[in-house]
Amino acid sequence: MYYGTMMPVDYVIPFVDSSDSEWVSAYRKYVPSDCTWCSNATRFRDWDTLRYQLRSISLLQLLRFAYSKF
């Protein structure tokens, strides 16, 4: 819903590089040993979603600009 004011928005995109050995060793310190889904490799796999997230953000900026002209 548009309220007539434009406010700056910050975007937070969580990203984990599962190939970073330092991160993996730090992560394993806090994961329970009996947790099967915690060590699942697909959990931290790069699904190439960053591209689509950035496209969505740029589209949102275009829409805000277009609607601000009305």
Image (tube, rainbow, N blue to C red):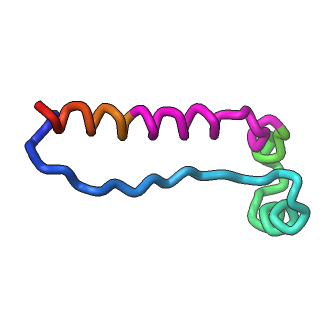
**Residue at 81% in and 64% down:** 23
Foreground residue among 49 and 27? 49
**Residue at 86% in and 60% down:** 20
Foreground residue among 39 and 35? 39
User: Split into 4 quadrants, where in the image is the N terminus?
Assistant: top left
Total marks shown come to: 0
- Image side of residue 50 versus residue 41, left or right: left
Looking at the image, residue 23 lies above or below residue 67: below
- Within the magenta stretch, is there residue 46? yes
Q: Quarter-wise, where is residue 68 in the image?
A: top left
Which percent across, then down, holds residue 25?
87, 66
Q: Find the magenta span and give its range.
A: 42-59
Foreground residue among 46 and 36? 46
- Image side of residue 44 versus residue 50, left or right: right
Q: Quarter-wise, where is residue 63 in the image?
A: top left
Q: Quarter-wise, where is residue 64 in the image?
A: top left
- Within the magenta stretch, is there residue 2? no
Which percent across, then down, holds residue 69?
15, 35
Looking at the image, residue 5 lies above or below residue 45: below
**Residue at 55% in and 50% down:** 13
Q: What main secondary structure does the magenta stretch of the protein show?
A: helix
Which percent across, then down, holds residue 67?
20, 32
**Residue at 82% in and 39% down:** 40
Which percent across, then down, holds residue 28?
83, 61
Considering every residue shown, the one lying at the far front of the view is 69
Looking at the image, residue 51 lies above or below residue 22: above
User: Split into 4 quadrants, where in the image is the C terminus?
Assistant: top left
